[in-house]
Image (cartoon, rainbow, N blue to C red):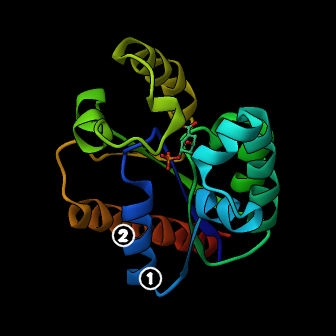
Amino acid sequence: MRNIVLIGFMGTGKSTVGKRLAQSLAWDFVDTDYEIGAVTDLSVSEIFRRYGETRFRSEESIVVDRISRQERLVIATGGGTALNPANWSALAENGVIIALHATLDAILARIGHKNDRPLLKGPKEAIEKLWIERQKCYAQADYIVDTSQKTVDEVVREILALLERMAKNEFSDVAKD
Ligand code: S3P
């Protein structure tokens, strides 16, 4: 059984949805940012402040490499995790990649007031630029779920329905062989 990997921009709901999805499936939930914090004993902001983004990305890749080898995990990645092709390959090899999408306005309404994300600290134009730049990468996911106008439960239900359809397709492919 493969992992379920949630990618997408900050504030699209990866961690909240991921936790609830894992509960529904009775699978384990892993959050890459949390794992990085556990390994380094530092918050994401502290790693960025003390050592810079390069160090954060390297810790992130180590975590991705480790968790990608496990099974039956719902994995919530950080917004930048999927941008590294090595991370993508590791996650995709053993998992279905689901991108959570949200409009920039929805994202800012959800998390714009928080200050625990170093890359959200700049002016709105800079955040918008990052959001636009990253859409191409997120669009490569196996599935995309728009979370902008939905509750967490609605998104979880949509993903569960998606997984059910996937399982049926896989089964009918096997039946054809
Ligand atoms: C980042 C997103 C954050 C965290 C770090 C960098 C990004 O995770 O990994 O601040 O590059 O988009 P969330 O997407 O969970 O906020």
Q: CA distance from mark 1 to mark 2?
A: 9 Å
Pointers 1 and 2 in contact (C-beta within 8 Å): yes
Nearest the camera: 139 or 40?
40
Image check: 117 left or right of 35?
left
Residue 119 screen position, x and y as percent:
52, 31
- Residue 144 screen position, x and y as percent: 41, 44
Q: Is residue 173 left or right of residue 94?
A: left
Mark 2 Cα-neighbour bin, 10 Å: few <14, some 14–19, many ≥20: some
Q: Secondary structure at mark 2?
A: helix
Three-letter code, disc 1: Leu
Residue 57 position (above or below residue 19): above
Q: Residue furthest front?
A: 50
Q: Which residue is mark 1?
A: 25
Image location of residue 13, percent across then percent down: 36, 53
Where ligand 1 lies, by quadrant?
top right
Q: Amino acid at mark 2?
A: Leu
Name which residue lies at 78% across and 51% down.
Answer: 59
Label of residue 104 in the image: none
State whether label 1 is within 8 Å of ligand 1.
Answer: no
Check disc 2 and report the residue beneath it. Answer: 160
User: In the rendered view, would you say 39 is above or below 112?
Assistant: below
For numbered disc 1, what is the local secondary structure? Answer: helix
Lower sequence index among marks 1 and 2: 1
- In the picture, the quarter occupied by the C terminus is bottom right
Q: Residue placed at 41% from the left, 82% from the top?
A: 23
- Circle 1 Cα neighbour tier, 10 Å, few/some/many (<14 / 14–19 / ≥20): few
Residue found at x 36% / y 69%: 160
- Residue furthest bottom in the image: 26
Horizontal relation, residue 15 to residue 142: left or right: left
Q: Which residue occupies the foreground of this view, 72 or 81?
A: 81
